[in-house]
Amino acid sequence: MEGWLSYRITLLALHSMTEKLRRVILYRDYFALFFDKQKPKAKDKIIWTIRLIEELPRLPRNYFKHIEGTNGLYEIRVSLGNDSFRIFCFFDQEKIIVLGNGFQKKTQKTPKREIEKALKIKLEYENEK
């Protein structure tokens, strides 16, 4: 979690110069546990992608995509060389994106167990509200 906090501070400093259209928040430590395991270049690319999602008026599908067959579950898509990462998220109100779990994608299709885990996190979040 410590690694995520230092990156978050850097991210916040960079954001002070740019207007955000959306706010990205963490729910518990699901995202932080994933983020802390990544190499520095992957962390930089993840932060860059999250910044795009906060700032762009229209989100390109190659960075942000609805998971078919779910009610409001999305994936943030990060590519770095041959590596692909997915971070599940969902909206809380219109302009707040809540980050859940993430994983490194190793197959063409997103593993069903990862989607199920994300749906459980989303339900847990909604039940706590």
Image (spheres, rainbow, N blue to C red):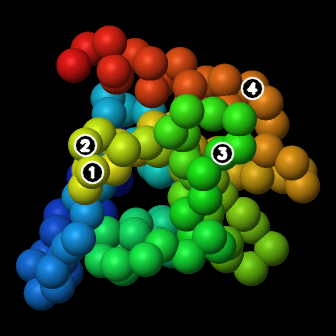
Look at label 3 and name its amino acid.
Ile
**Residue 19 place in picture, x, y as percent:** 15, 80
* Element class at badge 2: loop
Task: Assess whether mark 1 and mark 2 are in contact (beta carbons under 8 angstroms).
Answer: yes
Vertical arrangement, residue 8 with respect to residue 110, above or below: below
Judging by the rendered image, the residue that carries numbered circle 2 is 93
The mark closer to the camera, 3 or 4, is: 3
**Residue 108 place in picture, x, y as percent:** 90, 55
Look at label 1 and name its amino acid.
Glu
**Residue 57 place in picture, x, y as percent:** 35, 78
In which quadrant will I find the C terminus?
top left
Q: In the image, 57: left or right of 104?
A: left
Q: In the image, 44: left or right of 114?
A: left
- Mark 2 vs mark 4: which is more N-terminal? 2
- Mark 3 vs mark 4: which is more N-terminal? 3
Judging by the rendered image, the residue that carries numbered circle 1 is 94
- CA distance for labels 2 and 4: 26 Å
Q: Residue furthest top?
A: 127
The mark closer to the camera, 1 or 4, is: 1
* Element class at badge 4: helix
- CA distance for labels 3 and 4: 13 Å
Q: Quadrant of residue 103?
A: top right
